[in-house]
Amino acid sequence: MGIQGDYHIHTPLCQHATGPIEACVERGIELGLREIGFACHNPLPAGVGSDVRMREDQLDDYVRQVTALRERYRGRIEVLLGIEMDYVEGLEEYLAEQVDRYPWDYIVGSVHYLDCECQLGAWKGELPFDAEEQYTRYYGLVRHMVRSGLCDILSHLDVPKRSGRMPGQRGLQELDLTLKEIARADLCIEINTSGYRHADLELKETYPAFSIVEQAMALNIPFIVNSDAHAPEQVGLKFKEVEAFLRQKGCRQLARFKQRRREMYPI
Ligand SMILES: [Zn+2]
Ligand SMILES: [Zn+2]
């Protein structure tokens, strides 16, 4: 029992993760996980954000690598095929085509940029506007992503805090609105443990913070716990701590996915 999967694992194809990918699977087995899912950064057109993602011509290879692992580890751990999709306004058709083209088990939806040109990082310390605008733009884009129907899981939902700036009243209202929309759309929120290892995060905690997880719990939003591992040793990071918190708050089940269908399992 307990948390049985880690669905947000990167591969060296995105140029800022280390492998080998087999080592991530081995680590998952070592931790006693039943499932391990890869969700590397998706390609975007016209070289947008090209330094932190795989190229378009590498996507087939990514799918092939993960599918091969599934066969290789069958019976020991289930390997799932996911992708971390960057939601960028205006690219919905492009993204929909990418989503349709492969047999994904799930899509992790992320907002990493606050503009269509992908120049303004969602957690950049220096932006041409204040923190309220930063959070307002960020949550506005998350809601667009929710409405787009392109993803199953919403990743690191309060990632702008990595900038060191916290939301004010307006930002918090935007968050509240966003959580309600996620609940209506029946989507799943990721509890991402990478905040425990992010050097630039002053308070080491999950994305989103436990207080936001509690807010989402009150709306009956389902959760999944992921490490966002960019190296094999990061797989399953701090899962025990998150599990203890969830139990303490009365959360008794977590989501799992297969072929983009969600089911809940008891923890
Ligand atoms: Zn990354
Ligand atoms: Zn991300």
Image: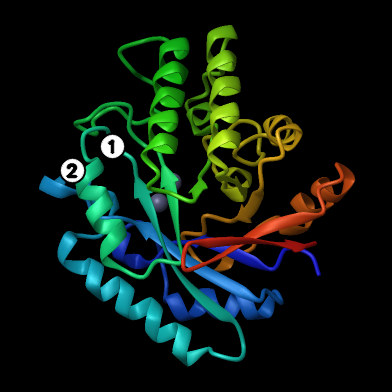
Q: Position of residue 90 (x, y in %)?
A: 21, 34
218 w.r.t. 4: above or below: above
Q: Looking at numbered disc 1 in the image, what kind of residue is underneath it?
A: Val
Q: Residue at x 59, y 48 (%)?
A: 192
Tell which of 143 and 42 is nearer to you: 143
Q: Position of residue 205 (x, y in %)?
A: 67, 39
Q: Residue at x 79, y 65 (%)?
A: 2
Q: Earlier in the sequence, mark 1 or mark 2?
A: 2
Are discs 1 and 2 less than 8 Å apart at CB?
yes
159 w.r.t. 173: above or below: below
The residue labelled by disc 2 is 48
Q: Position of residue 44 (x, y in %)?
A: 21, 49
Q: In the rendered view, how is the structure colored?
A: rainbow
Residue 256 placement: quadrant = bottom right
In the picture as drawn, the residue positioned furthest to the left comes out as 46
248 w.r.t. 38: above or below: above
172 w.r.t. 187: above or below: above
Q: Position of residue 79 (x, y in %)?
A: 51, 77
- How many numbered circles are shown? 2
Q: Looking at numbered disc 2 in the image, what kind of residue is underneath it?
A: Val
How far apart are the alpha carbons under marks 1 and 2?
10 Å
Using the rendered image of the protein, determine whether residue 101 is visible from the camera's viewpoint: yes
Using the rendered image of the protein, determine whether residue 234 is visible from the camera's viewpoint: no
The residue labelled by disc 1 is 88
